Every structure is written in C-alpha cells, then in structure tokens.
Image (cartoon, grey):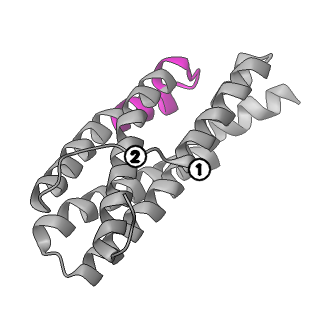
C-alpha cells in the first residue's frame, strides 16, 4: 500500500501500534516471570493486563475508521526485542536481569508514548472525533503512568542495591 494521505499514514501507524501492543503482551509475561525483583515483576504483570486492554482499544479505533485490525511490523520494537535476545545470550549473572529489564521497559514506554502522540496528532489533523481519539488518549495516559512508575523504581534503592552488590 502506498501512503499518500494523512489517513493512510494514520492507518499505517495504527497497524504498527497494534503490532507493538500485541507483541508486548507476550514479552511482558516473560519479563514478569524472569525479573528477579518482585516489585518490578509485579509491575510487568500488571502492565501486561493493561496492554491487553490497550489492544482492545486499538481494535475499537480500527472499527471506528472502517478498517480491519491488522498488524504492521515496527522496526523500533523489533530492535528492542533483538537487543533483549542479545542480552539473554550474553548475560552471565541473573542479577543483571533486573536493571536490564527495567531499562528495556523504560525504552519501550518512550517508544509507545511517541507513537501514540503521533497518532493523536494525525487524528486531530484528519479531524477524527472522540470515538477515535479517546481510546488513543487513554492508551497514551496509561503509557505515561507506566513510564513514571518505572522511573520511580529506577530511582529506588532496590535497583541501586542490586547494582552496588555487583560492583
């Protein structure tokens, strides 16, 4: 499909976010079980459930604009997942999983926030109504909340203690 209009770009980016959120449901499940830090693991588990709701909201947006929910690969997410695979091949200490997974989560949230901001900007330009914009804004708000939570954990002593123990 050739992208020629703002609507075409909107649909393309929506498909990418649908891909991202669907992949993240599985990744968050893995992170929840692999992360040694209980607080962070619980956060990943909670965000997995939230991400399932975000997928449902994206499906509503597809319906509102008369499109079938479809995925389009996202190089940004795929790159982050490749980084994680490489880390898993190289990691020699389980103690490194918590700080790595925390940082990976922060990177992912920032990618998602930027993508939702772009979708909302396009939706405004196209003059889509609240039935399209509201679900996107709800997802954006949740991603911002998750980023704040992860940054709070990053500043917390449990991660610092893990790193200090490794030094």
Residue 113's quadrant in the figure?
bottom left
Residue tagged by mark 1? 107
Residue at 70% across, 17% down: 94
- Which quadrant, please, contains the N terminus? bottom left
Residue at the front extreme, as displayed:
2
Mark 1–mark 2 Cα distance, whole angstroms, equals 20 Å
Say left or right for 102 vs 57. Answer: right
Residue tagged by mark 2? 72
- Which quadrant, please, contains the C terminus? top right
- The range drawn in magenta is 32-47
Depth check: 139 or 18 in front? 18
Say left or right for 165 vs 134. Answer: right
Residue 11's quadrant in the figure?
bottom left
The reply to whether residue 9 is visible in this rendering is: yes
Residue 115 marker: none
Pinpoint residue 58: horizontal percent, then vertical percent.
Answer: 23, 51
Say left or right for 19 vs 166. Answer: left
The reply to whether residue 156 is visible in this rendering is: no
Other-residue count near label 1 (Cα within 10 Å), few / some / many at <14 / 14–19 / ≥20: some
In front: label 1 or label 2: 2
Say left or right for 113 vs 62. Answer: right
């Amino acid at each position: 499909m050739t992208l020629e209009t703002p609507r075409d770009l909107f649909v393309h980016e929506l498909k990418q976010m649908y891909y991202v959120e669907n992949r993240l449901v599985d990744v968050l499940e893995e992170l929840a079980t692999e992360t040694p830090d209980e607080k962070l693991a619980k956060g990943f588990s909670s965000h997995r459930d939230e991400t399932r709701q975000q997928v449902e909201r994206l499906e509503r947006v597809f319906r509102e604009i008369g499109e079938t929910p479809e995925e389009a690969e996202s190089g940004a997410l795929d790159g982050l997942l490749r980084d994680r695979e490489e880390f898993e091949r190289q990691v020699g200490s389980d103690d490194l999983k918590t700080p790595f997974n925390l940082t990976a989560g922060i990177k992912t949230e920032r990618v998602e926030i930027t993508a939702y901001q772009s979708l909302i900007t396009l939706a405004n330009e196209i003059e889509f109504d609240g039935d399209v914009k509201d679900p996107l804004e709800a997802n954006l708000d949740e991603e911002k909340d998750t980023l704040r939570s992860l940054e709070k954990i990053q500043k917390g002593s449990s991660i610092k203690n893990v790193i200090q123990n490794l030094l």
